[in-house]
Image (cartoon, helix red, strand yellow):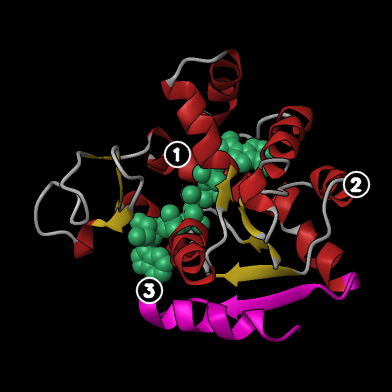
Amino acid sequence: MNIVFLGPPGAGKGTHAQQLMKYMNIPQISTGDMFRRAIREQTPTGMDAKRYMDKGELVPDEVVVAMVKERLAEPDCQNGYILDGFPRTVAQAEALEGIATIDVALNIDVPDEIIINRLSGRRVCAACGGTYHVSMLEGDKCPACNGELYQRDDDKPETIRTRLAVYQEKTAPLISYYREKGLLSTAVCVGTIEENYQKVLAALKTKD
Ligand code: AP5
């Protein structure tokens, strides 16, 4: 199954994609994670992407599309994948149609006030990439692998506001885009992570 996860920053795309990846045994392809890795490795793509990400803006479409095209050609994508954070513009969605057939676009719907709390409390493990909220942590190490936890540079309040505005302008139109194609399914995710995950699983079995 080829799945697109739509939803605003902090909706839980990464959290639920990681759960689903283990359950369905297909890879999670997060363009945000790919760019963060490229930044850590100081590649030219990473250095270019950082200028946009630090401001909460989108990386140019042609850069993201080329990166995803290359990733989808890898052997582990043969039996399906979860695209987490891609496409994010109508131009990206149109480009994706030329390289893949999408079975479902799952829209994770969460109101802004919940998102701001989630993002400002998010911590990420530098070793395994696990994502947590400070409210679930007892110490300052990753509960899964004991790695160092850090706060993302773009999780500062002013950058979060820009990311939400960019989402409304550039990415929210994809909800209608996929609805018109009969591929949209919506999960309203305002509960606990486990409750939300059950909604995601249920939504994957139906279309809006
Ligand atoms: P990216 O990394 O994709 O960020 P994002 O879409 O803004 O999404 P997030 O990772 O912030 O949130 P999420 O929905 O995955 O939520 P999470 O599961 O972590 O992109 C970063 C940047 O890269 C972009 O701004 C852009 O510059 C660039 N980029 C990436 N893709 C691009 C593209 N296609 N085109 C152009 N540019 C691109 O959850 C959030 C927090 O909530 C966690 O701490 C989690 O533990 C917590 N949480 C608490 N309670 C719950 C609950 N009940 N359910 C779920 N999560 C909960």
Residue that mark 3 sits on: 193
**Secondary structure of residue under mark 3:** helix
Query: What separation in Å lies between label 2 and label 1 (alpha carbons)?
Result: 36 Å
Which amino acid type corresponds to the residue marked 2 in the rendered image?
A: Gly
Query: What separation in Å lies between label 3 and label 1 (alpha carbons)?
Result: 26 Å
Residue drawn at 48 percent across, 56 percent down: 14
One can see residue 116 in this view: no
Residue that mark 2 sits on: 98
Question: How many neighbours does mark 1 have within 10 angstroms: few (below 14), some (14-19), or many (20 or more)?
Answer: few
> From the viewer's perspective, is the residue at label 2 or at label 1 nearer?
2
**Secondary structure of residue under mark 2:** loop
Considering only order in the chain, which callout, 2 or 3, is on the residue closer to the N terminus?
2
Determine if the C-beta at disc 1 is less than 8 A from ligand 1.
Answer: no
> From the viewer's perspective, is the residue at label 3 or at label 2 nearer?
2
Residue 78 against residue 176 in the figure, above or below: above
Residue drawn at 70 percent across, 68 percent down: 1
Determine if the C-beta at disc 3 is less than 8 A from ligand 1.
Answer: yes
Q: Is residue 167 left or right of residue 24?
A: right
